[in-house]
Image: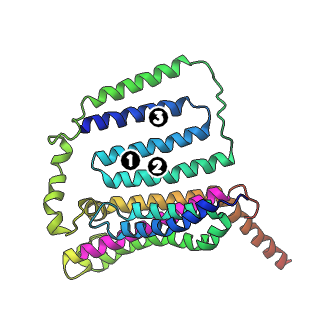
Amino acid sequence: MLDIVHLILFTFLAVVAVAIIRLKDLFAAVMLMGIFSLLSASLFTVMDAVDVAFTEAAVGAGISTILMLATLALTESEEHPEHNKIQVMPLIAVVATGAVLVFATFDMPRYGDPEAPIHHRVAPHYIEHTDDEIGVPNMVTAVLASYRGYDTWGETTVIFTACVGVMLLLGGHAIVDRFRRRKDSGSEGDS
Amino acid sequence: MISHLIPRVLSKLLIPLIMLFALYVQFHGDYGPGGGFQAGVIFGAGIILYTLLFGLDRAKEAFRPRVLEIFVAGGVLLYGGVGIAAIFAGGNFLDYDVLAHDPTHGQHLGILLVELGVGITVAAVMATIFFQFAGRGRTDD
């Protein structure tokens, strides 16, 4: 039963992805990207990764769609491809890379395989000792905030840096203007 | 400007619930799915919804960019501050065991504060980035 749900969701994901590539209307493509994120979120929920599904639904389907729409409002929503005919060399490169990636997945452990290496390193320690070491019922929170506090600290810093970058790139002219005005008034005061 | 009456009335009902839900996700993260990042994103989505329906100017009055900037840095500083506090209490950086008399209580306190820091930063960052995008191309600032 669960396999059928997976199959349907993955099929929808593939269909939406192909549609996004083929669409020339960027407005529709952005909407489909929102749907793509929502489908991913459903897939994560089915895989019992509710925390990730939460994030994907809020960020992927919600906020990034709105940011994309805001970007389209600043530019235009029609794609103008430079090359209309299929180019052979890039196609070969993409197909070859894709084939190598698919070939590499054959070595991966099956989904949910209890013998997979990831379940035999630190995961047993977390499962056995979270209750007496941290005392928090939600193991995901315990791992994210305590056992892997450094990782989360780094992630928070990344988000902070991204915000500073956006503020400088999009709002930088306001800061420069303010600085110039101050400099101008300062030099006037001197002379 | 077109007056989006029905979405505005509905959003006035929904936005408080969205923000309340964000706080629930924030402080219930120890027990159920969720945590600082998810809560921050949901709170930020609430602010963005308000901006979409009531305009950038009113949103900037309700959520002042200056205050948001302080929150962007404040959350990261809260996170780092917990780490430094652990050093001063005699442990390693981000080692919450030493924050209270009992190691488990220390862990609870540390996780709560750290997740709060993440939530504050993420909510403020989402709102700030959207304000920057929405304010782009305007002449007033």
Which residue is drawn at the image coordinates 15% and 54% (left, top)?
A124
Tell whether label 3 touches label 2 (CB within 8 Å): no
Q: Earlier in the sequence, mark 3 or mark 1?
A: 3
What is the spatial separation of the Cα atoms under label 1 and label 2, in whole angstroms?
A: 9 Å
Secondary structure under the numbered disc 3 in the rendered image: helix
Provide the residue designation for mark 1: A41
What is the spatial separation of the Cα atoms under label 3 and label 1, in whole angstroms?
A: 14 Å
Provide the residue designation for mark 2: A60
Q: Quadrant of residue B79?
A: bottom left
The answer to which of B59 and A115 lies nearer the viewer is B59
Label 1 crowding class (10 Å Cα cut-off): few <14, some 14-19, many 20+?
many
Provide the residue designation for mark 3: A16
Tell whether label 2 touches label 1 (CB within 8 Å): yes
Q: Could you tell me which quadrant the C terminus of chain B lies in?
A: bottom right
Q: Earlier in the sequence, mark 2 or mark 3?
A: 3
Considering only vertical position in the picture, is A84 above or below A112?
Answer: above
Q: Earlier in the sequence, mark 1 or mark 2?
A: 1
| SS assignment for the magenta stretch, majority | helix
Magenta residues, as a range? Answer: B106-135
